[in-house]
Amino acid sequence: MSMIGNIENRLALLGGYENQYPGERDTIGLCRTFLTCRDSLPEEYSRGHITGSAWILNSARNKTVLTHHRKLNLWLQTGGHLEEGEEPREGAIREGMEETGLTSLRSIQKTLFDLDIHLIPARGDQPAHYHFDMRFLLEALGNESLVISRESRDLRWVDLEDVPQYNRSESVLRMVLKSAPYGGFDFPGEFPYNGHH
């Protein structure tokens, strides 16, 4: 697929996401600018990447897979850089399979589940840059065992209500909150994020 085709598809994902989450217009607008005229952005943004992440639920939809990322030393969803010609959803599914060993993953929805822009610190000769992370909601259908990849220190199924014990960032807790309509989880009254900034 051509770069123009990729951009059009990604802009379409953003448009659908904006209709569903109008309160996230600032993030969506920055990602749209990155896709259409990245040279107008500050350098740490313009040298960024579109990435694809998988928010994986179990079949009961009350647990998610978190990986203890080896380089970042954080508990996160699976995901990473896209391969040549790959769309973000395809990359999210591939990364989800590679980082968990789960082969039964399927999309719960084809649309964008979440969008996050976050800074990746400088490391070695790679300067600081931003990831424009397009996230997709997946489900593991089987009872497969998790397999830790070389990118992880640990990997586990975590009850959605327990995710704040692993990562309290808005970026992750927002996805927990967005999981509620898909069943299997009722938010405790003291959940540390309510979707409002």
Image (cartoon, rainbow, N blue to C red):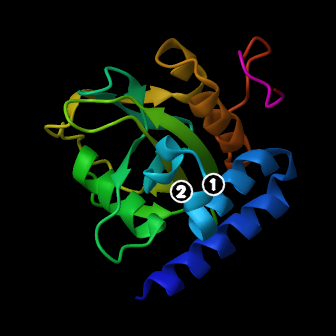
Q: On residue 152, which mark appears?
A: none
132 relative to 145, above or below? below
Which residue is at 71% across, 54% downward?
A: 28
173 relative to 54, above or below? above
Q: How many marks?
A: 2
Pointer 1: residues within 10 angstroms few (<14), some, or many (20+)? many
Residue 70 position by quadrant? top left
Q: Disc 1 marks which amino acid?
A: Phe
Q: Is residue 21 left or right of residue 114?
A: right
Q: On residue 136, which mark appears?
A: 2
Identify which residue, 35 or 153, lies in the foreground.
Answer: 35
Residue 174 in sight here: yes
In the rendering, at what x and y percent does residue 182 appear? 68, 49
Which residue is at 41% across, 57% downward?
A: 141
Q: Secondary structure at mark 2?
A: strand
- Residue under label 1, please give it: 113
Q: Sequence-wise, which precedes: disc 2 or disc 1? A: 1
Q: Secondary structure at mark 1?
A: loop
Q: Is residue 73 magenta?
A: no
Q: Is residue 24 left or right of residue 109?
A: right
Which residue is at 69% across, 65% downward?
A: 14
**Whether label 2 touches label 1, CB < 8 Å:** yes
In the rendering, at what x and y percent does residue 48 appear? 45, 50
In the rendering, at what x and y percent does residue 101 appear? 22, 49
Magenta-highlighted stretch: main secondary structure? Answer: loop
The range drawn in magenta is 192-196
In the rendering, at what x and y percent does residue 25 appear? 80, 51
Q: Is residue 128 left or right of residue 30?
A: left
Task: Report the Cα–Cα distance between label 2 and label 1.
Answer: 5 Å
Q: Residue furthest left?
A: 150
Which residue is at 81% across, 26% downward?
A: 197
